Amino acid sequence: MKKAVLIIIFTMIFIISVLIYEHLTHPGPFGSPFTLTDSHGKQVTERDIRAKPAVIFFGYTMCPDICPTTLFDLSRYLKKLGHEADKIGVWLFTVDPEKDTPQVLNDYISNFSEKIIGISGEPNKVHAAIKSFQIIAEKKVNKDNNDYTYDHTASIILLNKGGRFIGKIRYQEDEKIALYQLRQLAKSAD
């Protein structure tokens, strides 16, 4: 009897260990399911992002520095990639959906690249999606004039086809490094 109980316990420990190992070495897609609106007014879900390798940036249109700098850099990288850029999806999630409607995002993104697609929608759904990507986005209100900014993650997130996290491009990364990462991402589409 004791031997049978020990065998069951060791078998359960082994199975649990394998499941934990599998989860840690092969995590699932990054971010949880969502249904939002893109900058062209169309419904967008996590399946759209996972359909091909993806570049995701989290920002907002009233950002004074990080967002326009990053989007300018990203648009420059996309031009240098040429046709390789067609193999990846490029997304801008707003962290300020109260102000950044799909139309506002569309107007803003048009200053950078037509390859970038904005994502907005109902604020509670957008904030839930951002949280599921483990992104920091904290509103900072200036009490003197009621103006605000967001402290937010400044890196560009890289996901493979299927949505698994494979890396990031740091804010103001060296161009050669960023282009190398983006080319590797585009190659992974093949």
Image: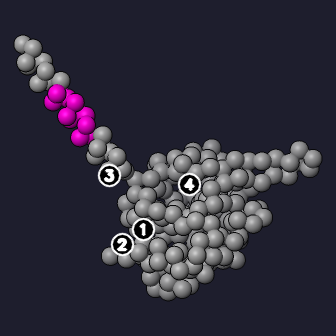
Neighbour tally class for label 3: few under 14, some 14-19, many 20 plus, Cα within 10 Å: few
Disc assigned to residue 135 = none
Label 4 amino acid? Leu
- Callout 4 secondary element: strand
Name the residue that disc number 1 marks. 53
> Who is closer to the viewer here, 142 or 128?
142
Name the residue that disc number 3 marks. 26
Q: Can you tell which of label 3 and label 1 is closer to the viewer?
A: 3
Q: Are marks 1 and 4 in contact (CB under 8 Å)?
A: no
Name the residue that disc number 4 marks. 36
Q: Which numbered disc, 4 or 2, marks the residue that appears first in the sequence?
A: 4
CA separation, marks 1 and 4? 19 Å
- Residue farthest along the right direction in this orientation: 144
- Callout 3 secondary element: loop
Name the residue that disc number 2 marks. 188
Q: Report x, y in % for residue 169.
A: 54, 67
CA separation, marks 2 and 3? 17 Å
Magenta-highlighted residues: 10-19
Q: Which numbered disc, 3 or 1, marks the residue that appears first in the sequence?
A: 3
CA separation, marks 3 and 1? 17 Å
> What main secondary structure does the magenta stretch of the protein show?
helix
Q: Is residue 145 above or below residue 40?
A: above
Q: Are marks 2 and 1 in contact (CB under 8 Å)?
A: yes
> Who is closer to the viewer here, 186 or 128?
186
